[in-house]
Amino acid sequence: MLDEIFFLLIAEDDADDREIVKFVIKQNFPDWQYYIATNGQALLDYLSNRPPGLPLISLIMLDINMPIKNGIETVDELRTIPLYKDIITVGFSTSDQDWVKNEFIEAGGDEFFQKPNEIVQYEKILSLLPEMVSSARKMNR
């Protein structure tokens, strides 16, 4: 597990999915901190106005299909911001089409999952995130 605080940044436009993610985090990962934006532009605005002294962002989860700025556009822009270009990004979509995953990865995304439709699936995916961060940090040493 990670030595420091695990801080998850999430962009998700669907209110039900936001509530499910919050529920899973509170029930299974109570030590995690998180912030949820309702679209990619709101996530980028949060990053540009983020007060100093907050924990480092461990990982960013992006819904692919969002209004204003979708997950692919958001990860593409994140990769141009020096402070955030190396943060692990995970995309989610209800689509199981390969082109969606491929576009996200080509834009700079690190991992992609089909959006779960059951809480237990969310639990399983979220449980993988700290190890993804830990592995990435070991590789960057």
Image: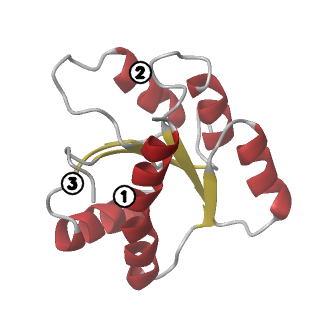
Q: Residue at x 20, y 44 (%)?
A: 4
| 80 to the left or right of 62 | right
Q: Mark number for residue 139?
A: none
Amino acid type, callout 3: Trp
Q: Residue at x 43, y 29 (%)?
A: 42
Q: Mark number for residue 45?
A: 2
**Helix, strand or loop for disc 3:** loop
Relative to 74, does residue 127 appear above or below in the rendering?
below
**Helix, strand or loop for disc 1:** helix
Q: Is residue 69 visible?
A: no
| CB-based contact (under 8 Å), mark 3 and mark 1 | no
Q: Which residue is mark 3?
A: 32
Distance of mark 3 from mark 2, alpha carbons?
22 Å
- Where residue 13 appears, x then y in whole percent? 48, 49
**Helix, strand or loop for disc 2:** helix
Q: Is residue 127 visible?
A: yes
Q: Mark number for residue 130?
A: 1
Amino acid type, callout 1: Pro
| 30 to the left or right of 1 | left
Q: Residue at x 50, y 36 (%)?
A: 140
| CB-based contact (under 8 Å), mark 1 and mark 2 | no
Answer with mark 1 or mark 2, whichever residue precedes in sequence: 2
Which of label 3 and label 2 is nearer to you?
3
- Where residue 105 appears, x then y in whole percent? 73, 46
Distance of mark 3 from mark 1, alpha carbons?
10 Å
